Image: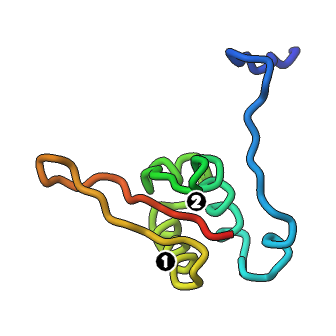
Amino acid sequence: MARKKNQLDTDQRPFVMAYHDFLKSGLLDNHYQIVVFIYLKMFADDNNQCYPSIKKLSKLSKISVHKIKITLAELESKGIIAKKNRTRLDGGKSSNLYTLYD
């Protein structure tokens, strides 16, 4: 059976840019950190900020929610990301704002 091509609204395919020197630096200790960082980069805007939910990161990366939380904490402790808690107008929790430092 032939595989269907992915159809996008534009001819330009989205991509993620990661600096080679950063990826080779050894700051990312394991494949979990690499994968989570790349997915954060996928969501990042021009200011290197993003706010994907932990559930969304887990679903896309196929890494458990528990391991995503651990990995985000590791990246934060290394200074690779900064996390800011966000709340909704009604006081409820929202997804965190992540700033990436690569």
Tell me if 8 is positioned left or right of 90 in this view. Answer: right
Q: Which residue is drawn at 38% across and 59% down?
A: 96
Q: In which quarter of the image is the C terminus?
A: bottom right
> Residue 41, position in %: x, y?
64, 54
* Dot 1 amino acid type: Ala
Frontmost residue, 16 versus 101: 101
Tell me if 15 is positioned left or right of 68 in this view. Answer: right
Q: Which residue is drawn at 58% across and 59% down?
A: 63
- Pointer 2: residues within 10 angstroms few (<14), some, or many (20+)? some
**Contact? badges 1 and 2 (CB < 8 Å):** no
> Residue 13, position in %: x, y?
78, 29
- Pointer 1: residues within 10 angstroms few (<14), some, or many (20+)? some
Q: In this view, does 53 lie above or below 29?
A: above
Frontmost residue, 32 versus 53: 53
What is the quadrant of residue 34 in the picture?
bottom right
Q: In this view, does 45 lie above or below 67?
A: above
Q: In which quarter of the image is the N terminus?
A: top right
Q: Which residue is drawn at 79% across and 25% down?
A: 12
Residue 73's disc is: 1
**Badge nearest the viewer, 1 or 2:** 1
Residue annotated with mark 2: 63
Q: In this view, does 23 lie above or below 58?
A: below
Q: Which residue is drawn at 59% across and 84% down?
A: 78
> Residue 70, position in %: x, y?
49, 75
* Dot 2 amino acid type: Ile
Per the model, the C-alpha gap separating discs 1 and 2 is 15 Å
Q: How many labels does the image show?
A: 2
Helix, strand or loop under label 1: helix
